[in-house]
Every structure is written in C-alpha cells, then in structure tokens.
Image (cartoon, coloured by chain):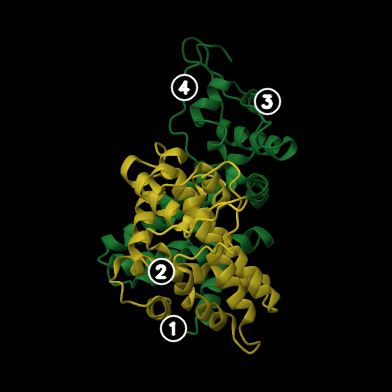
Chain colours: A green, B yellow
Amino acid sequence: MSATDIRVAPHVSHCHQACCHATTGTDITYTRRVARWTPNARGRLETAALELYDEHGYDQATVTQITERAGLTERTFFRHFADKREVLFGGSQLLQDHLVERVTDAPPSAAPWEAMTAALSTAGDVLPADREYSRLRQRVIAAHPGLMERELIKLATLSEALADALQRRGIAARTAHLAADTAIAVFKAAFTRWLETPEQSDFATLVREASEEQRVIVGG
Amino acid sequence: MSATDIRVAPHVSHCHQACCHATTGTDITYTRRVARWTPNARGRLETAALELYDEHGYDQATVTQITERAGLTERTFFRHFADKREVLFGGSQLLQDHLVERVTDAPPSAAPWEAMTAALSTAGDVLPADREYSRLRQRVIAAHPGLMERELIKLATLSEALADALQRRGIAARTAHLAADTAIAVFKAAFTRWLETPEQSDFATLVREASEEQRVIVGG
C-alpha cells in the first residue's frame, strides 16, 4: 500500500458481526489516484491486536506488530483507532449509543424498568457474533489493571448515560440513577454468563434470567 | 517537633467522628526521649488536605502545604498516609472491612439480601459524623477524573469483597456477584442521599428507603 493511499471506503461501520470478521482473502484494489480499499480492515486489526495483547501482554504489543500481523499499514490502523487501547473499547461507545437509543425509543407508556430491560435485551445486536473474540478481549482486560480501570469507567459512563435517558423520559434523577445502577448489575451478570455459555445461548434470555434472579434476590 | 520524634500514640484509629475532628488546641507534650504525641493528627491532616484540594485543586496541593496548614510535620503525615491520595481513600478500606465483617457475622439463617442490607444499614458507623467533611471529599473527587476513577475502583473492589463474603456463606458465585452489584446500587443511592440531606437523617433509614425503592423498580 502506497503512502498516497486514500480512503474510499463508504462507511466503515464498527460492526462486530461474523460476516464482517470473516477474512475473505480478497482485496479490492483501485489504481491511479484512488488507492486500495481494504475490506474489513477494522476487523482484521482488532483480531491481530487482541491476539498480540493476549500472547505478549498489552503493554508489550506495538501498533507496528499489530499492522504487520494484519497485513495492513499503520496509516490504516490510525484511520480506525486513536490508539492501541481504542481497539478494546471502541465497542463500548457503540453499545452505549445502542442502549440509550433503545431506552429513548421505548413506548411512552413503558415503566423505567421495562424500558431498561427491553433495551438490555437487545444488547446482543451489537455484541460480536464470534463470542470467542469477546472472551479473548475479557481475558486481555482482566490481566491488566489499567484496562480493568478503563472497563469500570466505561460501565459507570454507561450507567450515567442510561440514567440521563430515563430522566429525559420524565423519571426523577434519584430513581433514574438507582434504576440505571441496578440495570448495570443485571447487564454485568448477563454478560458474564454470555461469555461462559455456548454460542447458542441468547443475550436476551440471559438478561431475562438475571433480571428475574435479581427480583428474587431483593425479595420481590 | 524533633527529628527523634517517636510515635507513642496507643492506637491511632481511622475515626472520623466529630469528637476526633474537633481541634482542641491542646497538645500533649512528652519530653526526653519520648517525643510529643499529637492528638488527632490524622483528623487535622485530613481536614487540611481536603480544604487545600478544594481551594487549589488536588494536583496543585502539596504535602508540605497540608502539614503547614495542619501545624504538623511531613513525618507525621507519612506516618498516617502513604501519599496525598490516601487521605481521600483511607476510609474506603475501613468501610469495606466493616461491611464484609457484618455480612460474615450475619446469622447463618439470614438470606443473602438480608445479610447484605443489614450490613449496609450499619455503614453509618464508619462514615464521618461531620457530613460536611464527606461533602467536601465528594466535591474534590468529582472535580478530578483520576480521583473519580479511583473511587469507581474502590466501589468495584467493595462489590467483589461483598460477593466473596456471600460465597463464604455458601452462596453460588453468580448469585453472590449479582447480589453484591445490586447492593452497590443501593449503597450509592443511600450515600448520595446521605450527602444531600440534613445531618439528622440516618444512614440506615436511607438504605431502607433506597432498598425499598429498588424493589419497586424491579417489579417486586
């Protein structure tokens, strides 16, 4: 790839679906002024990065190594990610935007908890279809205190965003924050179980189970 | 205070009670070999530090300034705190130890949630009697992203510790983590309300109210 490589990809989505993650081996190459567009560059960079973080440790892995393994340039890397940490957390923003949108779009008649759990149930839509990818990501994060901190901050930010969304539905701030934090407990439980269970299990089912278990725990 | 200052304080507790925080103006001074013991040095250092963090920003305040304001030496400071961040988070460990102990000591017949909320209800025992001190601490932390991160990590650590305590009571890991995370939502709600309400309000009452509100939210 030349230094005059120009991005011509239409919309590079943050999609984690298997269809995008599959490496086709075919590269569409444009010549003259309009340089090559690499299909699924983002997915290839993510996989290469996670493998390297897992094999050598997050701190040791370099962007150069990631791009070499992915067979892409550093220029392409920085087109998709601000830095090597962003490879791990780009999906968090996507998840947050998705959940906030679901809560916002819930019917006006929906109670806070109904809107919240209905939103959580759709989280599977933005989680990677290849669950092994998420397991690898979780292992990398768990092995690094700095990344664990970042993960906690992302969850706290998600809770804040959900509380804001509830407040925009007319829910009092106190109730909105309590409901959002309580929902995060359900989300964490469902996500942990999603990682631990076979690929056939459905995120919506795990949310329903965790939510029901929580209701029993608090004496409902 | 001389360089041969020797610590003779019997047990310097982490007490935040108003009785300790009150500056009496009287210093008990021992001469000859046994150096001066400063009553409530810890409380004076905490107050001086928080005031400085609030006035000038956490990053700007130095240990030298803290000790000057408290009328104590740096040596005394480092006898009580590892660094200037520890001034803000020393109480978190105390709170965690206290809550874990309560959960552990709950009657064997107590259900997980019963043990958990009973423990949370006693958190007031280790919170500063002077609520203004906690409000100041919260303001300092909220103004500094790095301190906010640390606060989140302390809460996550507290949740883990409570889940461990439940597991030692024979509760399955999944349920223990879900219950602990759900309890943290109640604790956060109670603590926020405790900071916002007059000094007369009781932490146990706020835990009961938040817990009841949560039960209603999740449809119990």
SS assignment at label 4: loop
Q: State the residue lying farthest toward the front.
A: B32
In the rendered view, would you say A96 is above or below B118? above
CB atoms of marks 2 and 4 within 8 Å? no
Give the CA distance from mark 3 to mark 4: 22 Å
Give the CA distance from mark 2 to mark 3: 60 Å
Q: Amino acid at mark 2?
A: Cys
Q: Residue at image x 42%, y 54%?
A: B44
Q: Residue at image x 60%, y 87%?
A: B110
| Residue position marked by numbered label 3 in the rendering | A65
SS assignment at label 1: loop
In the rendered view, would you say A48 is above or below B88? above
Mark 1 or 4: the one toward you: 1
Mark 2 or 3: the one toward you: 2
| Residue position marked by numbered label 2 in the rendering | B19
Front residue of B49 and A183: B49
In this orientation, does residue A155 appear? no
SS assignment at label 3: helix
In this orientation, does residue B165 appear? yes
Mark with earlier residue (2, 1): 2
Give the CA distance from mark 3 to mark 1: 53 Å
- Residue A7 is tagged as 4
Check chain identity for marks 2 and 4: say if they share one: no
